[in-house]
Each structure stands twice: as C-alpha cells, then as structure tokens.
Amino acid sequence: MSTPRYRLDQPREQRRSLRTPRYNAEAFGVAAERIARFLGTAKFLVYMTVFVALWIAWNALMPASWRFDPYPFIFLTLMLSLQASYAAPLILLAQNRQDDRDRVQGEQDRAQAERTMADTEYLSREIAGLRLGLGEVATRDFIRSELQQLLRDMRPDDRQADSATG
C-alpha cells in the first residue's frame, strides 16, 4: 500500500504563481508611508523644483546635440505623470494604514474610557457606602464632648463653679 502524495492532516504548501507575486505587505506599507511622508514635505517640493528647473534649463540652453528632451519637454511631462501615478496610490495606501491605526486607537481609547467609567462608578459607590457607615460611627469630637459632659456631671463642685463664673 503506497502513502498518499499529500497528507490530509497537514495543509498544502503554497505554490508560487506568476499571477500573484509574493511580497511582504507590512514592509511594503511601511515603505509607502515613508515615501508618502517625504512627498508631503517642503524638502520634496524644493528638490522637485530644482530638478524640473535643471531639466528645463539643460534642454533649453544647451547645444542642440546635448539636448535630450526638446521643447515642449514631452519626456519631462511623461516623467512627472509617472511620478504622480505612483505617488497618488502610495499616499492613499499610507492614509488607509493611518485610518486603520486611528480606528484601533479609537477602540482602545473607548475601552479604556469604559474601564475608567466603571472604576469611577465603583469608587463612587464605595465612598457613598463609607459615608453611610461613618454616619453611624461616633466621631472623636463627639466622644470627647460626651466625656467632658460626663466629667462635668460627676463633679458637682465644678458645675457650681462654672455657673458662678458664667
């Protein structure tokens, strides 16, 4: 009896396919966020402005044999369109990842707020219970005043002296 080629109690290994290339989605997302973060800086705008200005200056001022993109700068337009076509999805990917992080953070904040509210309500009930319990307990000042009153009642001569001076 021969053993089956694939065991039914174990998952199959994934086959490589040309239709679905393998990539690390997390690493790709981190790279997209870095690029999107850079695209949103003044440094990028300065670099892009310098690049375009140099491109135009080179192709407008250099001898005709050195020019690689004569006016109306079709190749520059193509390069800028290509850059924009990649920048937009990268920015959207970075925004989606940020939205996911914000949603998770919001859920965690709500859970923390609920726990804080429950703790606050519990402590409020405990304090109310302690206040009710303390209402039935004799305080130090009450006991002191009662003892002083008893001492006055036990000494009749002090009571007479108090009434004579008062």
Image (cartoon, helix red, strand yellow):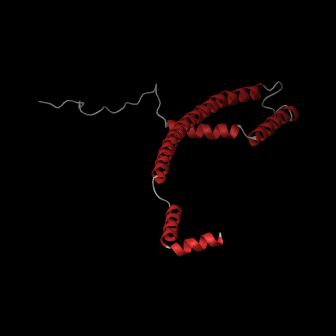
> Does residue 120 sit above or below 159 in this rendering?
above
Q: Is residue 30 above or below residue 77?
A: below
Q: Closer to the camera, 21 or 117? A: 117
Q: Position of residue 109 (x, y in %)?
A: 54, 40
Tell which residue pokes out farthest to the left in this image. Answer: 1
Question: Image check: 135 left or right of 9?
Answer: right
Foreground residue among 117 and 14: 117
Quadrant where the N terminus lies? top left
Q: Position of residue 149 (x, y in %)?
A: 52, 66
On screen, residue 19 above or below 55:
above
Measured as percent of width and height from the top left, residue 93 is found at: 59, 31
How many discs mark residues in the rendered view? 0
Q: Residue furthest right?
A: 61
Query: Residue 68 vs residue 138: left or right?
Result: right
Q: Nearer the viewer, residue 73 or 28?
A: 28
Relative horizontal placement of residue 10, taking residue 119 as reference (left or right): left
Q: Nearer the viewer, residue 64 or 139?
A: 139
Q: Estimate the x, y position of residue 4 in percent, counting from the top left.
A: 20, 29
Q: Measuring 57% from the left and 40% from the top, which residue is drawn there? A: 30
Residue shown at the point (65%, 72%) measured from the top left: 165
Residue at horizontal 37%, vertical 30%?
15
In the image, is residue 164 above or below residue 62? Answer: below
